[in-house]
Image: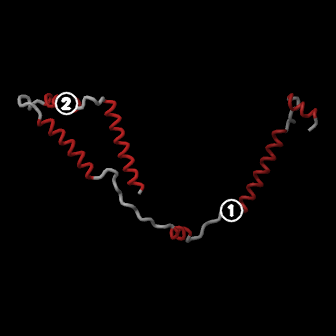
Amino acid sequence: MKKDDKNNVKKGLEKPSPDFTKNIMQKIDAEEVAIGNVLSKHSLESPSTSFTDSIMANIEVRQLTPYKPVISKYVWYGLAATFIGLIIFTFANTTVTNQTKLGSRLDNITETFQSVFTGVPYLSYSAMAILGISVLLLLDQKFKKQRIS
């Protein structure tokens, strides 16, 4: 381009011809027709009739591994026994006078849990939470190692 043409383009002084859009659209239409001709000559190839059979024959059959739960039955039994033991321990310590009222039993449950936590006065709740999270993280690591190997 000449310097004058560049300056005209920068300034916006050059205006397109009145049939500029028509000429561009004709070029685009001609290109679309050419692309259509090329694509029609090269149609899609269809696979052979035994294509699926040959692919399925190449697929390896893997043995399914049996499901192994992360937490075994014995751990669940232990948790259930612990929970039932806490409930039995709570109801065994009820007073004889108010054994029939549900409210007094619930009060007794809360008193039992409070007595368990007051038996360890030097541990605060945050320390117990940190200890509990640490134990859970250690158990998680142990189970991950078992799953990997």
Dot 2: few (<14), some (14–19), or many (≥20) neighbours within 10 Å?
few
Q: Quadrant of the N terminus?
A: top right
Q: CA distance from mark 1 to mark 2?
A: 84 Å
- Labels 1 & 2 near each other (Cβ < 8 A): no
Mark toward the viewer: 1 or 2: 2
Give the number of marks.
2
Residue at horizontal 5 percent and vertical 28 percent from the top: 97
Picture layout, residue 66 above or below residue 127: below
Between 110 and 6, the residue placed more toward the observer is 110
Mark 2 residue type: Ser
Mark identifier at residue 43 = 1
Q: Residue 92: where, in percent of width, then height?
A: 11, 37
Residue 12 spot, x, y in % from top left: 85, 29
Image quadrant where one finds the C terminus: bottom left
* Snapshot quadrant of residue 49: bottom right
Q: Give amino acid for label 1.
A: Ser
Disc marking residue 115: 2
Query: Which coloring applies here?
Result: secondary structure
State which tag comes first along the sequence, 1 or 2: 1
Secondary structure at numbered mark 2 = helix
Within-10-Å neighbours for mark 1: few <14, some 14–19, many 20+: few
Please name the residue shown 6% across and 31% down the image.
96
**Residue 72 to residue 87: above or below:** below
Mark 1 secondary-structure assignment:
loop
Give the farthest residue toward the left.
97
